Image: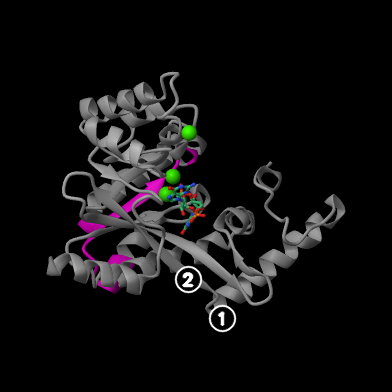
Amino acid sequence: SKQNGRGTFSFYASTLNDKLLAYRGLVEDMRRGLATGEFYLEYQPRFDTRGRSIRSVEALVRWRHPERGRISPADFIPAAERSGLIMPLGEWVLRTACRSAAGWQDIGVSVNVSPVQFHNSDVVELVKRVIADTGFDARKLELEVTEGVLLEDAEKARNALRGLKALGVKLAMDDFGTGYSSLSSLRTFPFDVIKIDRQFINDMEDRDGGREVVQAILGLGKALGLSVTAEGVETVRQLTMLTADNCVEVQGYLLAHPMPAERISGLLRRDAAV
Ligand code: C2E
Ligand code: CA
Ligand code: CA
Ligand code: CA
């Protein structure tokens, strides 16, 4: 189940019996944190392998807990989903990302949308409202969804994705290759971008066909007319192979870690000056 999956409540629960209490504590703290501004965003650049310029940035949520310090999204997103807090949190993320990115000429921003948020609220209406409120150009907004979005109610998901496309928003399939139906979903849902899961990038340097798998995904993207982003690029060798294999967009610690909005502004100013 979700709360066992990623060691979610380890900060709060030392024994299994503490789990429910821990969950409640975490949810209470999140609720308070949302009201008092403990959440913030970092942005990780996505680079063009040819020009080495920043094409867009991915917004990643962070939580600075007053007593526990930084808590990873992997540790609080599942509880936010279970409790429904993902709705206000997700809206805050979208709004904040669009507001920041409105000041960044020429680059796009991508925002992760939880399957829970996707199925329990009107995502199309929300995005429309945020775009209207922030004046952000919808064509520069990309939403990253995982396959989980498509599994629950495929028809509803398809309609929502179409509605988002109609607004001009781009759609990325996140963590591509890790689920059960990635291949057929690419064909039957209106995606623009494939994000190759970092596990595949990590396997590229192994001798047992890791690179060939990535090449196959790149070929698939090309055949279907989709752009492909490689996630989790950590070594020069991976970058060299990806560039040789005509992967156009890369993201990972080798190139840049997630960083505060002000540093993105700084990087863009530096780029513009060159
Ligand atoms: P994700 O969407 O797959 O995001 C990429 C994660 O990989 C980020 O972790 C990022 O910091 C990390 N990463 C980037 N480059 C590298 C690399 O070269 N090597 C390695 N090992 N990792 C790298 P982060 O920020 O901890 O986020 C974890 C997950 O939490 C995200 O995975 C996403 O599923 C979720 N998440 C983060 N922010 C949001 C959000 O605003 N909304 C929702 N719904 N989920 C979010
Ligand atoms: Ca993502
Ligand atoms: Ca991912
Ligand atoms: Ca490896």
Start-end of magenta stretch: 130-148
Amino acid type, label 1? Thr
Q: Which residue is mark 2?
A: 40
Ligand 3, seen in the image, is in the quarter at top left
Asked whether residue 181 is in view, the answer is: yes
The C terminus, quarter of image: bottom left
**In the image, 68: left or right of 138?**
right
Q: Position of residue 272 (x, y in %)?
A: 14, 67
Determine if the magenta segment contains residue 175: no
Query: Residue at the spot x=82%, y=56% of the render?
Result: 14
**Residue shown at 28% from the left, 66% from the top:** 131
In the image, is residue 142 part of the stretch drawn in magenta?
yes
Q: Give the percent coordinates (x, y) of residue 165.
A: 26, 47
| Residue 86 to residue 189: above or below | below
Label 1: which residue?
A: 36
Q: Nearer the viewer, residue 235 or 147?
A: 235
Q: Is disc 2 placed on a helix, strand or loop?
A: strand
Is 25 situated above or below 198? below
Relative to residue 102, is residue 244 depicted above or below? above
What residue is rendered at 26% in x and 44% in y?
249
- The residue closer to the viewer here, 187 or 222, is 222
What percent of the width, then of the height, locates residue 103? 24, 73
Q: Nearer the viewer, mark 2 or mark 1?
A: 2
Whether residue 226 is visible, yes or no, is: no
Q: Residue furthest front?
A: 236
Residue closest to the eye, 103 or 142: 103
- Residue 219: x %, y % from top left: 26, 25
